[in-house]
Image (spheres, helix red, strand yellow):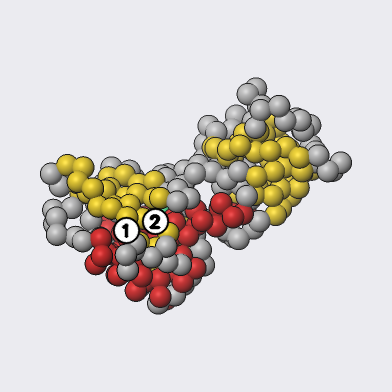
Amino acid sequence: MAFVTNALFREDAYLKLGEGQVAAVNERGGIILDRTIFYATSGGQPGDTGFLIRSDGSRIAVAATISGETKDEIIHVPAPEQPMPEPGETLSLAIDWERRLRLMRMHTACHLLTVVCPYPITGASVAEDDSRIDFDIPDSSYAKEDVTERLMELVAANHPVFTRWITDDELAANPGLVKSKNVRPPSGTGRIRLVCIGDDAVVDSQPCGGTHVAATGEVGAIHIGKIEKKGRENRRFRIRFGPLPGN
Ligand SMILES: [Zn+2]
């Protein structure tokens, strides 16, 4: 039976430290807690790394965080040769915050790119230094300078970023919320998490389980590194931190 972990990062993406009780250690050494601040790999965003700290101060390095049988079962994958905790043990939790904040800034930047390029998404990946989104895009005239400029307008406006839950029925009534061409948000659980940008979500809202910064200004300077042609109507946009080189 799958465990249900209370995913604290879903309500507060800024939790750097926390506490959790060991619910189980699975047959592959994965550690499952009753609650966690560690994001599990999903929706193109990599899971967190960090440490679980035992009461004697010894540390268990977490090399990856993934989901198990269901999205609600979150598994902390220890690095090799780590001490193993006992079920019932309470652990202090510390994520690699510097890395996570970069992933949050990048994930929000990816959502901003879907505002600037409102086309069906065929793939996406959030990473610390270089994220990418693939679009089915009939218009080949997009230039990285223009896209960068429009992205930075949205960053400079410092729009609020917040989450809101809707029902399956509300999503069904608003199919335009879903931007990915092939991936449907999980339905059947009764509720869908939307990530919204702008007052009253005027800039954007889309189903997403990821972690985001609280305002677009926190994304900071970003630019489009490259627009690659992946097919007749498919373009890969790469987002990088920092201003557009040469500008
Ligand atoms: Zn997202």
Disc 1 within 8 angstroms of ligand 1 (CB): no
CA gap between label 1 and label 2 equals: 6 Å
Residue 229, x across and y down, in percent: 19, 46
Identify the residue position indicated by label 2 in the image. Answer: 240
Please, what is the three-letter code of the amino acid marked with disc 2? Arg
Residue 100, x across and y down, in percent: 56, 53
Residue 38, x across and y down, in percent: 61, 47
Whether pointer 1 and pointer 2 mark residues with C-beta atoms closer than 8 Å, the reply is yes
Please, what is the three-letter code of the amino acid marked with disc 1? Ile
User: Which residue is most to the right?
Assistant: 56
Q: As drawn, is 108 to the left or to the right of 72? A: left
Query: Mark number for residue 136?
Result: none
Identify the residue position indicated by label 1 in the image. Answer: 224
Give whichever of 51, 223 is nearer the camera: 223
> Can the viewer see residue 43?
no
Q: Is residue 124 above or below residue 175?
A: above
User: Which residue lies at the image location 47% right of the left edge and 60% below the top edge?
Assistant: 105
Q: As drawn, is 210 to the left or to the right of 233? A: right
Give the position of the C terminus as an image quadrant.
Answer: bottom left
Return the disc, 1 or 2, that comes first in the chain's sequence. 1
Determine the quadrant in which ligand 1 lies. Answer: bottom left
- Local packing at callout 2 (Cα closer than 10 Å; few below 14, some 14-19, many 20+) is many
User: Which residue lies at the image location 36% right of the left edge and 70% below the top edge?
Assistant: 152
